[in-house]
């Protein structure tokens, strides 16, 4: 197989959702298709004492090793599938966002009984900002949920993306009959078990009990309405992340999952060229290259090693090859590698664009680093900075250890574990994060790796807005719009809530407030 063939069959994606929408259940079904697991419940089953493969960081955490978003690699129907997990719940962190820089498409799972929820909005914004194609799976059709039209409206209004319903449900909950497949003009009947009965549009009259029911009839009318009034299907808009194909189904039943997965794999893009040093690097380029989107420090003090997660962007990676770290110009032989195959980590011998490999980090890599085969190096675009939402003031417990405290903090900031700010009016350290977990990791690592105890004082949730340097005027800011500086010395204001942000905007309409989510 040529490098081009290898690239073409790769599908690298993340599944985003709000906790409890069904991400784990859906992932589990995908893993079943890929024969990575043998039975349902091996992934979920927190009750049965087994653990989610995609939630395997739970296991790792219990063992006290690490906190990580995981990667799963498997072959399915001619595709080489890479699923990157985006941790939610209390594990939500900047890593969750950064994972989205390493994928080529995203599956967004929405709970049909609840609609769009906050964490989905946050993750969606990152995808939108990066123009990543988004495929929507509306889950839990086996339960009484929101009206499908209402759900589409919600996606369009709240998320600001066009929708195209790929299929359409006839009833839901107890009245659920199945789905109309719009592209293929057929009805897939829900039989209550895993068998799906497929009825071509031309044969509806052979199933009078089904097709004469009010539920079927009204759903059929809705499909016709969609045909006339809905947005037209546009592959181009989908590829640009401007339109999302929407699939209805049930991950648990499971219903509509296999057809969703097949259609998704067929429509989702393979790795595309990426910008580096002003040029576009084609994935089929011979020369291996990739960038580091995550560094995972081993939480076990007995093993101080770290793993850098590399998204391969071009060429063929081979274990033992020499690569150059563009930032320093130093060459390394990469022999300790891992590919993530569900719950186990196997040594990876070769990898292609779209694959994620873990390489041993002897404390030299940084998030965003580019690795290139040979001496002719280049650099992938810097990873975006994501706005933190939580803020805490950090001080060292024992002032005699201020030096180690600073050193540890600098190192952890460089790794991207947390974001550090300095008070503008007062000299203080303010640590920003997108999830509470980042503080736990930060505290733990400062103690274990630098022998420093940190005291946190909560500032709370804040809305950060960056300022234009020429517009910075210290007298305009108070505690409700706390002024701080980021690592580069740029000023930003931390607004207490929407109200104080609006109040400030009303009062000082000339001052430009920059939202990183909108401007990256
Ligand atoms: P998450 O990873 O997005 O957090 O969600 P997860 O898959 O863990 O699913 C959350 C809950 O929703 C689980 O129930 C799961 O069984 C249920 N669920 C997922 N998909 C469907 C679906 O299509 N229909 C219905 N009715 N339920 C679904 P739980 O009671 O919290 O967990 P469990 O004890 O059943 O495992």
Image: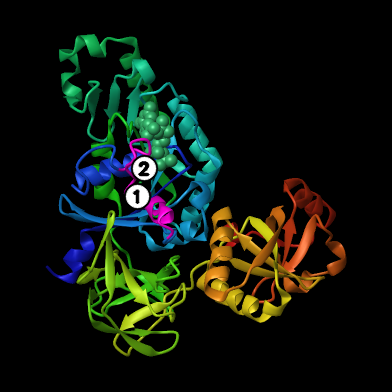
Residue 102 location (% of width, % of height): 39, 63
Whether residue 520 is visible, yes or no, is no
Report which quarter residue 321 is drawn in.
Answer: bottom left
Residue 343 location (% of width, % of height): 29, 54
Q: Nearer the viewer, residue 420 or 497?
A: 420
**Is 454 above or below relative to 62?**
below
Instruction: Note whether ligand 1 is within 8 Å of mark 1.
Output: yes
Report which quarter residue 470 is drawn in.
Answer: bottom right
Q: Quadrant of ligand 1?
A: top left
Residue 318 location (% of width, % of height): 21, 76
Mark 2 Cα shell of 10 Å, populated few (<14), some (14-19), many (≥20): many
Q: Which mark is residue 54?
A: 1
Which quarter of the rendered picture does the C terminus lie within?
bottom right
Magenta extent: 43-64
Image color mode = rainbow
Residue 176 location (% of width, % of height): 33, 19
Q: Which mark is residue 24?
A: 2
Q: Secondary structure at mark 2?
A: helix
Q: For the point 40% across and 23% down, which residue is it?
A: 143
Q: Earlier in the sequence, mark 1 or mark 2?
A: 2
As measured in the structure, the alpha-carbon distance from the residue carrying label 1 to the one carrying label 2 is 7 Å
Q: Secondary structure at mark 1?
A: loop
Relative placement, left or right, of 415 versus 484 is left
């Amino acid at each position: 197989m040529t490098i081009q063939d290898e690239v073409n069959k790769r599908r690298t994606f993340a599944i985003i959702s709000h906790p409890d929408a069904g991400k784990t259940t859906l992932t589990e079904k995908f893993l079943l298709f890929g024969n990575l697991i043998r039975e349902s419940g091996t992934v979920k089953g927190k009750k049965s004492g087994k653990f989610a493969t995609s939630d395997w960081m739970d296991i790792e955490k219990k063992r006290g090793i690490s906190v990580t978003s995981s990667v799963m690699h498997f072959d399915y129907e001619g595709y080489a599938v890479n699923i990157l997990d985006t941790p939610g719940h209390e594990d939500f962190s900047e890593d969750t966002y950064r994972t989205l820089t390493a994928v080529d498409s995203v599956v967004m799972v929405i709970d049909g009984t609840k609609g769009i929820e906050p964490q989905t909005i946050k993750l969606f914004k990152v995808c939108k900002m990066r123009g990543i194609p988004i495929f929507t799976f509306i889950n839990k059709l086996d339960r009484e949920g929101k009206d499908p039209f209402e759900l589409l409206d919600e996606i369009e209004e709240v998320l600001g993306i066009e929708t195209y319903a790929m299929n359409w449900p006839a009833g839901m909950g107890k009245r659920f009959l199945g789905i109309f497949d719009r592209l293929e003009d057929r009805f897939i009947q829900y039989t209550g078990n895993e068998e799906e009965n497929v009825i071509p549009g031309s044969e509806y009259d052979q199933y009078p009990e089904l097709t004469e029911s009010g539920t079927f009839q009204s759903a059929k009318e809705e499909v016709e309405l969609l045909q006339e009034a809905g947005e037209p299907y546009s592959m181009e808009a989908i590829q640009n992340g401007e339109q999302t194909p929407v699939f209805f189904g049930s991950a648990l039943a499971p219903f509509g999952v296999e057809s969703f997965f097949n259609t998704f794999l067929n429509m989702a893009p393979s790795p595309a060229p990426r910008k580096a040093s002003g040029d576009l690097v084609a994935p089929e380029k011979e020369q291996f290259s990739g960038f580091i989107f995550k560094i995972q420090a081993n939480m076990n003090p007995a093993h101080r090693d770290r793993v850098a997660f590399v998204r391969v962007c071009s060429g063929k990676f081979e274990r033992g090859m020499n690569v150059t770290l563009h930032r320093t110009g130093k060459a390394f032989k990469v022999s300790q590698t891992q590919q993530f195959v569900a719950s186990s980590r196997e040594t990876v011998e070769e990898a292609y664009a779209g694959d994620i490999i873990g390489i041993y980090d002897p404390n030299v890599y940084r998030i965003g680093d580019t690795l290139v085969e040979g001496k002719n190096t280049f650099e992938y675009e810097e990873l975006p900075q994501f706005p933190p939402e939580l803020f805490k003031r950090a001080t060292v417990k024992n002032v005699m250890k201020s030096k180690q405290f600073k050193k540890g903090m600098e190192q952890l900031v460089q790794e991207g574990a947390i974001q550090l700010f300095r008070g503008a009016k007062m000299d203080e350290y303010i640590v920003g994060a997108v999830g509470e977990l980042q503080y736990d990791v930060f505290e733990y690592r400062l103690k274990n790796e630098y022998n420093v105890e940190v005291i946190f004082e909560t500032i709370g949730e804040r809305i950060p807005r960056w300022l234009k340097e020429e517009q910075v005027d210290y007298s305009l800011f108070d505690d409700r719009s706390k002024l701080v500086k980021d690592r580069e010395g740029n000023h930003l204001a931390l607004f207490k809530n929407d109200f104080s942000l609006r109040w400030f905007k009303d009062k000082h309409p000339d001052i430009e407030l920059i939202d990183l989510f909108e401007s990256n």
